[in-house]
Image: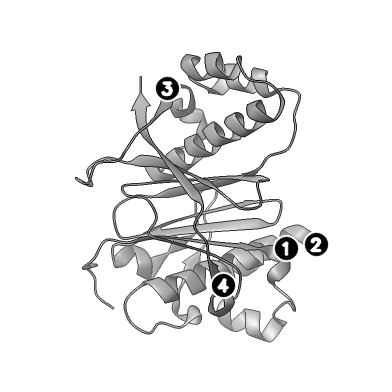
Amino acid sequence: MPTEPFWPITRVFLCHADTLTPLPNNSALQQLLGDSEHQRLNRYQGKRYREFLQSRLLLRQALSSTLPGTLPPNFWQITERTEQSPLVHQAVEAGWHYSLAHSRGMIGVVISNDGPCGIDLEYQRRRANIVELADQWFHPSETKLLATLTNLELIAAFYRLWTMKEAFIKAKGSSVFSGILARTHFVACNPTDDGKDLYAHSLELPTGYFSLSVVCHHPPANITQGYPLATAKTITPRVTTYIIHQS
């Protein structure tokens, strides 16, 4: 496997945990998952069990379909880490970046050799404390904007901003407690081609119930939805790109 990628690419993979039918048997899981993955998987039951398992299977297939060479899913050695994305040793050594997200059974993976990347996915549920959350975590310019919106517009705008912030945090390898959320705000733009800056890309999914954002240097070149990847469909969501400002 080459240690220096020779073309820039960023891909996004989406699927729902319900597509994992039937579940792999114990023998297949023993051959595929590492010790730390088994330890974490065994802490879950029901939907959470299925969601965690599907995310690790999707990550492996995504890596195998993206990185150069013919690499089977069981090639990837994954180590779980507390409050961080799992460590995929061979991908990191080869200079690739990746990020995972999940919400209400929907799972997202972004893979890139074009620098750091982050992904966040949130189900747009109604909540009574949107204004309070924005006051605590958002930039003043964003709270002012949200104050002018009502009902569905408010919900969509809140989750669009939230997912962009979370994706930015993941791309920076930071945490929600670092202060980045409140210092960061976004301005819609046309990205440059210099590849030096990270941009936030908001993707409008066909379902309409989820907000999805990816932070990377260039908009994702390919987005698929479904599992296994051999039957996944390429989708073309509307993408809005934002400059990331920190103050």
Q: Which mark is residue 183?
A: 3
Disc 1 + disc 4, Cβ < 8 Å: no
Measuring 71% from the left and 51% from the top, which residue is drawn there? Answer: 104
- Using a 10 Å C-alpha cutoff, classify the residue at mark 3 as few (fewer than 14 neighbours), some (14 to 19) or many (20 or more): some
Task: Identify the image quadrant of the C terminus.
Answer: top left
Count residues near mark 4 (Cα–Cα under 10 Å), then give few for <14, some for 14-19, many for 20+.
some
Q: Is mark 1 on a helix, strand or loop?
A: helix
Q: Looking at the picture, how far across and down is residue 18, in whole percent?
A: 73, 66
From the viewer's perspective, is residue 133 above or below residue 82? above
Mark toward the start of the polypeptide (4 vs 3): 3
Q: Dot 2 corresponds to which residue?
A: 46
Q: Do the residues labelled 2 and 1 touch (CB within 8 Å)?
A: yes
For the residues labelled 4 and 3, the Cα–Cα distance comes to: 38 Å
Q: Which residue is drawn at 60% across and 29% down?
A: 158
Mark in front: 4 vs 3: 4
Tell which circle, 3 or 1, labels the residue nearer the N-terminal end. 1
Which label lies toward us, 2 or 4?
Answer: 4
Q: Residue at x 72, y 25 (%)?
A: 151
The type of residue carrying mark 3 is Arg
Residue 191 sits in quarter:
top left
The residue at 45%/80% (across/down) is 75
Cα gap from disc 2 to disc 4, whole angstroms: 24 Å
Q: Is residue 77 above or below residue 17?
A: below
Residue 89: percent from left, percent from top: 39, 67
Tell me the element at label 3: helix
Label 2 secondary element? helix
Q: Name the residue under label 1.
A: 49
